[in-house]
Amino acid sequence: MHDRLDSGEGNRTTIHHIKLQLLGRVSHTFIILPHFTFVKFNCLMICVQQKLVLLIPLLRLQFFYTYNYIVSIMVQIVCPNVEKHAVKMLTQLYRMKQVNDHCDFIIQVGDDVYYTHKNVLSAGSDYFKAMLKHDTTEVREGKITFKDVDSECVKNCIDFIYSGKFEIPDEKMKDLLYVAIMMQLEDVKQAVCDILEEALSVENYFSTRNIADMYGLDSVSARCRVFFHGNIMKVSNQPEFGSIELNDILKFVKSEESKLCEEEKMTLSLNWVEKSKNNEQHLHECLKAIKFDQISSTFLERLLQSNLFISRDLAVYKLIDGHRMNASKRSDKMNEEIGNDELIILFDDDTECIRSFNPINEKVEKFHDEKFDQLKHFGTISVDSYIYVFGENKSVHRLNFLIKNSKWDKMKDTICDHGSFPRPVSLSGSIFVIGGSFPTATSDVERFHSFLNEWFQLQNKPATIRYPSLVSLNDSIYCIGGEGQDGVQVSSFSKYTPFSSKWVELQPMRYPACDCGVVAIDQKIYVIGGFCGEGSTKNVECYNVTSAQWTSLSSMNDCHGWVCAHRIGKWIFAVTESEASDDIEKYDVSNDKWIMVKLEVDQCFRIYTSTLVTI
């Protein structure tokens, strides 16, 4: 860069500006004349004559001017560690505040007095900056008194201004937020919002939502809305659920996009009414929005028997009972059309379609439009109007098979890893998973509550197991066979009672096996096929619960591994994973006889697994 200097005598001298950065710490700007000039740095000499010969910067400078020529040196010192310096300054200011050193402003809350510095408050808070720049009473007196605020929260906010740190007591989150907003401390406000969002749970949902609404916390309100939509059934059990507005309840009940089935929508409406007497007058409006034609008669009957509110309100009872009778008539009409109200659902591994097997005419037809192409390696079970599949990576999905256009809904994952295709069992409306499957051997036991979409871990099985077969009978779950950790089939037979969390070992089977089909009929447990040794087996055994004795029955016609057994009327149907169209056998319980079933199908298919549903 070149400038021109007027010497005052008509002469112009060219000045060269040179800016140098040394060691990243000292910045120098030199204005150097083109003529010979000496500049003395203490005892060291620099010779400048159009070019820099030597530079040794020192802070104490002496200038020698020759004739009318000027040499100037500008030195800017930068701290080697700016952050460390800033922390040191804040620490010193905080200590000065603590001992009332050079403090010129007092903040009083009740009997508590906090000494501060005006300039620090103004720099850290727009609230104090605006207050202290005017000639107010507080400025003249050097004191401000806060009323109706929490003293500890005021102290925390003052500490934040001085140190950038503060504490957030859980029980005073709301009070701290109020003070932070008053003092216009956005960082404190945002930190509280972050904690409210992270800590959001079913238990604190309503208190968090109230705080968000009170202070206009948009991000927290948005998080509450998402949480409410995803956990509404669990939230509906909270005492404050009755405070929800009618329009919000109707929005859920009428929504076509909601993942809730009609049974859950009805449960939601009843929970809302029961939580507040003011809502009782709106129950009929909620019930009008529910599609009762998609609710099973079994569910309505159970509701009439167990719900105290319905039993007290005669008008509601008659309304629901009328819908129950209509649901029964629909069920009877379906039975007349198909000859039975039970179907065996087959998962076709070739087309990834869901098919149904009618045990009356032995026809296989398309059952539902939804495929299972996104689901791989799973066990399955049906409960009420849902088909549940339990797959790898703890995943759980379900499909409402009564709704034609329904989709697979992702449910909450299991707590423990039960392998790729665990075998679930139902008892008293809950689903249980015990042990593991490929590649996991475990003793874990879990129970799934479908309405809450929640898993609960129960008393572990005494022995680690893989590929056990499960069946429920008399409020207990029977665990049969399986593989040990060494990969060898076992003949173990045990009973688990969830209500007492007790495991009891019973008389073992006659043959060790895993992946057996199992079904309970009239206090007898039938164990069918499975894998024994190196291959599948055709063995069939029966355990009499009353006499506690095992009996061998007629063997199946063929060997079958990975058997799913289903009882329909007086028959037991054994379905196995196979590419053959005739790999279903049925067992005449009365005559102890197995019969091969020749399926009537419109195309070839491969059975992956199966479950039994009631239409």
Image (tube, grey):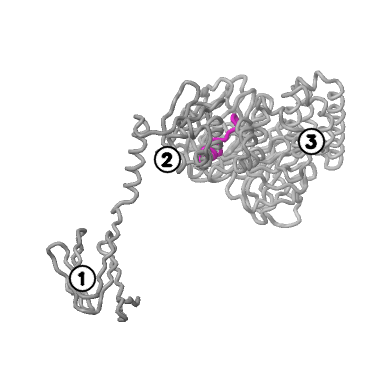
Nearer-the-camera pick, 260 or 167: 167
Q: How far apart in space, not on screen, are marks 1 and 3 (Cα)?
A: 103 Å
Callout 1 environment at 10 Å: few (<14), some (14 to 19), or many (20+)? few
**Residue designated by label 3:** 295
What kind of residue is marked 2?
Val
**Residue designated by label 2:** 120
Q: Give me the residue at 27% from left, 59% from top.
A: 25
Q: Position of residue 511 (x, y in %)?
A: 52, 34
User: Quadrant where the N terminus lies?
Assistant: bottom left
Residue 417 vs 73, above or below: the answer is above
Q: How far apart in space, not on screen, are marks 1 and 2 (Cα)?
A: 46 Å
What kind of residue is marked 1?
Tyr
User: Quadrant where the C terminus lies?
Assistant: top right
Q: In the rendered structure, does residue 314 fall within the stretch colored magenta?
A: no
Q: Reading the chain from its start, which is encountered first: label 1 or label 3?
A: 1
Q: Which residue lies furthest to the front in this view?
A: 9
Q: Give me the residue at 50% from left, 44% from top.
A: 438
Q: Nearer the viewer, mark 3 or mark 2?
A: 2
Q: In which quarter of the image is residue 87?
A: top left
- The magenta segment is 189-204
**Residue designated by label 1:** 65
Q: Where is residue 348 in the image (x, y as percent from the top left)?
A: 67, 52
